[in-house]
Amino acid sequence: MRTMSARAAKNAFGLLIDTARAEPVVIEKHGRGVVVVVAIEEYERLAEHTLQFGKNLDSTKSEKQEN
């Protein structure tokens, strides 16, 4: 995972986009990570995984309540 300062990300936005398409990029302010930029495909994969996890969790709760 690459890291960029907020200033570098602002000044080299095209590079940030190109890099984030290949791997997640942590953006730092004052030496601390504040956000992560990821490619849309990775975001969609993570969002689907999160949604599926939530559905599985809900079905587990329902099964326990029935017993």
Image (tube, rainbow, N blue to C red):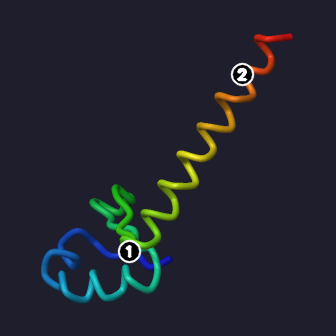
First in sequence: mark 2 vs mark 1? 1
Q: Which mark is residue 61?
A: 2
- Which residue is the extreme one toward the front? 66
Q: Residue at x 47, y 54 (%)?
A: 47
Mark 2 residue crowding within 10 angstroms, few (<14) / some (14–19) / many (20+): few
Q: Position of residue 29 (x, y in %)?
A: 27, 60
Q: What is the quadrant of the C terminus in the image?
A: top right
Q: Nearer the viewer, residue 59 or 49?
A: 59
Q: Nearer the viewer, residue 45 or 39?
A: 45
Residue at the spot of label 1: 39
Count the numbered circles shown: 2
Residue 28 located left or right of residue 43 = left
Q: Alpha-carbon distance for marks 2 and 1?
A: 33 Å
Q: Residue at x 47, y 70 (%)?
A: 42
Residue 21 located left or right of residue 59 = left
- Amino acid type of the residue that numbered disc 1 sits on in the rendered structure: Ala
Q: Is residue 23 above or below residue 45?
A: below
- Amino acid type of the residue that numbered disc 2 sits on in the rendered structure: Lys
Q: Position of residue 16 (x, y in %)?
A: 27, 81
- Which residue is the extreme one toward the left? 11
